[in-house]
Amino acid sequence: MKTNIKNICCIGAGYVGGPTMSVIADKCPDISVNVVDKNSERIALWNHSNLDLLPIYEPGLDEIISRCRGKNLTFSTKIREKISSADMVFISVNTPTKTKGIGAGQASDLKWVEACARDVAKFSIGHTIVVEKSTLPVKTAEVIKKILEASQITKNFQIEKSFDVLSNPEFLAEGTAIKDLEKPDRVLIGGEKNDAILALHNIYSKWVPKEKILHTNIWSSELAKLTSNAFLAQRISSINSIGAICEATGADVREVARAIGSDSRIGSKFLDAGPGFGGSCFKKDILNLVYLSKYFGLDEVASFWEGVVKLNHWHQKRISILVVEKLFGSVSNKKIGILGFSFKANTNDTRESAAISICKDLIEEGAILYIHDPKVEENQISKDLGLNSINLNRKNKAKNKIQNSGDWFFASNIDEIFPEADAILILTEWKEYTNFDWEKISTKMRRPAWIFDARSILDPKELENTNLNLWRIGDGFNT
Ligand code: UDX
Ligand code: ADP
């Protein structure tokens, strides 16, 4: 088997497939990298001449696309053609949590992965190495292998169509995807056959130091991905739980985090208390672990990990309840400015964003939200909230009547959110939210006015000469 790959096909042009393949194409000019997707609108955006319209916002991605696209990097819907010519196929499609049937609410829905495996089985020619890139439940490689093996063709005792399956989980974080891909902490390759592992190793070794490319068995690789995300999410639930104790006791979670983080065994990263973790991976991966543990009868293990997700959910509710309580027990018809809707800064992704549940709660309580985000578009927020924004006419009407349930307004201009607002709630740590003139803002808001900083981006000193009330996450002093 050849270990020198010349032609790659990646199925799935999403948050993982797009950036990963762009970096491989950039680092390996001698490899033809072809990204395919069944969604023609998404592909059209990947091919758009205006790089501001790429379907994914990642710092540095546009530069790579302009260097490689049309040379050794293509985006198309030609699934059959690109699989046929590939030596290596990456499966990089979405695996959301099942909403119905067996394992609903916990197990991942593998129907798209299965569809890809069937396409590879049908269209591939000769020997193909299939790489699982999507985050998958442990033992998914077995499903892929079974589908592929069923289509293996032997003629005159010669194998004409054959496969190897590798697990190569992605550890990139949104917003820093290009940096994470260019300088990874490690690359994990799980597999059974040395030649197949070497083929993928040779690609990464073009830019990743060899000692950072780890080889494991396929199940360890799949489980390591879930475990990494579970450990990271667990740290966030841990620090958020301590934040609640800080607020109750007069301690400050930033000081506690600094103190524990300087213990080298604990480390200082991923200790920022916030509005609760979001993103497409953490909750889904933990729920996969929970499902797996229950399947193997490990109920205590399952409830241990389930606790991390439960705490996150409780914590988001805690913030909405707290806002209502501070505003005299009612937010009905009150204007609240929401700063940030994405699940973290530097991404337009809103999947599982804490902002979704907090905004829904406040709307339910009757608040009129003015939502701003530098990258998230109005129609995405409408989809997430299950409610269209109010237009100006409805806004004026809304002002004139006491409403039972609230509404929201898309603030394309950030200055719209301050006048007459009762509160501002900071939910995403965008850099542009760190340089406000709070003295000026305080003159515009309705008094008594509150600033709720769920991301610790404000320095309380900045508000000292204003009559604004400040609540900061995990700050027992300002509570
Ligand atoms: C995560 C993993 O980091 C990455 O390795 C994996 O491949 C995919 O899942 P991502 O979801 O992009 O990446 O974001 P991440 O930076 O991990 O943040 C996840 C959530 O935790 C965000 O909502 C973020 O705001 C929150 N967070 C993170 C905190 O609240 N506090 C912290 O200290 C760090
Ligand atoms: P991720 O965060 O895992 O990258 P995304 O939802 O951003 O997930 O992207 C997954 C992409 O995979 C989507 O663009 C979707 O259209 C594509 N996709 C899903 N199933 C298939 C399939 N069978 N063939 C081709 N593309 C697929």
Image (spheres, rainbow, N blue to C red):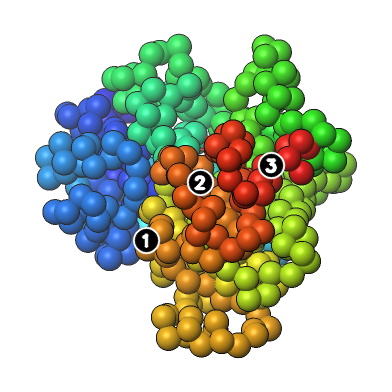
Q: Judging from the image, what secondary structure is the residue with disc 2 in?
A: helix
Mark 1 residue's CB less than 8 Å from ligand 1: no
Q: Nearer the viewer, residue 261 or 250?
A: 250
Q: Nearer the viewer, residue 73 or 175?
A: 175
Q: Position of residue 270 (x, y in %)?
A: 61, 30
Q: Amino acid at mark 1?
A: Asn
> Ligand 1 sits in which quadrant?
top right
User: Which one is in front in this view, the residue at disc 2 or the one at disc 1?
Assistant: 2
Which quarter of the rendered picture does the N terminus lie within? Answer: top left
Which residue does the image show at 63% across and 57% down from the upper left?
A: 449
Dot 1 corresponds to which residue? Answer: 413
* Sequence-first tag of 2 and 3: 2
Asked if the residue under mark 3 is in contact with the one under mark 2, i.e. CB atoms within 8 Å, the reply is no
Q: Is residue 404 left or right of residue 168?
A: right
Which residue does the image show at 23% across and 28% down from the upper left?
A: 28
The CA distance from mark 2 to mark 1 is 19 Å
Q: Amino acid at mark 3?
A: Ile
The CA distance from mark 3 to mark 1 is 26 Å
Callout 1: 10 Å neighbours few (<14), some, many (20+)?
few
Question: Looking at the picture, does residue 84 appear above or below residue 61?
Answer: below
Callout 3: 10 Å neighbours few (<14), some, many (20+)?
many
Dot 2 corresponds to which residue? Answer: 439
* Sequence-first tag of 2 and 1: 1
Callout 2: 10 Å neighbours few (<14), some, many (20+)?
some
Q: Position of residue 256 (x, y in %)?
A: 74, 25
Can you tell which mark lies on residue 473? 3
Q: Amino acid at mark 2?
A: Glu
Question: Looking at the picture, does residue 148 appear above or below residue 131?
Answer: below
* Sequence-first tag of 3 and 1: 1
